[in-house]
Amino acid sequence: MDKFTTLTGVAAPLPIVNVDTDMIIPKDYLKTIKRTGLGKGLFAELRYREDGSDNPDFVLNKPAYKGAEILVAGDNFGCGSSREHAPWALLDFGIRCVISTSFADIFYNNCFKNGILPIRVTPEQLDLLMDDAERGANARLTVDLASQTITGPDGGSITFDIDPFRKHCLLNGLDDIGLTMEKETAISGFESELAEARPWA
């Protein structure tokens, strides 16, 4: 998993409440267990017209937000079914950070396991960040995980809370497998001792 330290990028505004995982990645794209290639299905029902062409009115299709790495979204983001394909699709598209007032618990946890930083802010803070995001490509946000700050294009910053363990994992690029491999020496030692004590096993 890639480390998350500091991210400076375009923030796309998505002022929609209750964005569920089916909206993030429709069920038609769930036939794969690969984490790559799902970016094309991200928000597919909003991004594409019935004929398959881009919907020019959707924010991520607008030129100013084509390379967005941050999403500023409405309340209760990631609700609905517990599909891990939702953070996979966001990451494959290039989104590394989602900011909202609240997240569905399973989606929130899945983000950390896939290298995406979900940030909870107050409604007042979200209004400020949404305003920044609506300025387009010239208004870039900087998210600094170490200092737990979001800095806007005008230099103003807000702080956010995050669980220390999850922060450690993101800063060091540790998913569940990575955390296990940190104990590789102890695991190998245990296996060696077990092999000597129980050679028949």
Image: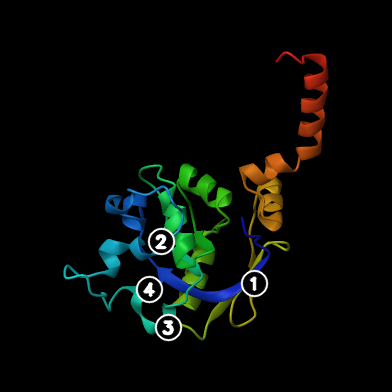
Q: Is residue 28 above or below residue 187?
A: below
Secondary element at tag 2: loop
Amino acid type for the residue under numbered disc 4: Leu
Q: Which of 101/114 is in front?
A: 114
> What whole-number distance in Å separates the C-alpha atoms at marks 4 and 3?
8 Å
Using the numbered discs, state the Cα–Cα distance from disc 2 to disc 1 in whole angstroms: 34 Å
Of circles 4 and 1, which is in front?
Answer: 4
CA distance separating discs 3 and 1: 23 Å
Which residue is the site of mark 3? 64
Q: Residues within 10 Å of mark 3 (few under 14, many from 20)?
A: some
Q: List the residue tagged with mark 2.
A: 37
Give the distance between the C-alpha atoms of the residues marked 4 and 1, in whole angstroms: 25 Å
Q: Residue at x 55, y 52 (%)?
A: 114
Q: N-terminal of the two: label 4 or label 1?
A: 4
From the top left corner, tell me how far across and down residue 22 is, in percent. 32, 51
Relative horizontal placement of residue 37, taking residue 194 as reference (left or right): left
Give the residue pinned by disc 4.
60
Residue 157 has which mark?
1
Q: Position of residue 79 (x, y in %)?
A: 39, 47
Q: Is residue 76 visible?
A: no
Establish if 151 lies above or below 191: below
Q: Image quadrant for the C terminus?
A: top right
Residue at (47% x, 68% y) in the render: 127
Q: Three-letter amino acid code at disc 2?
A: Gly
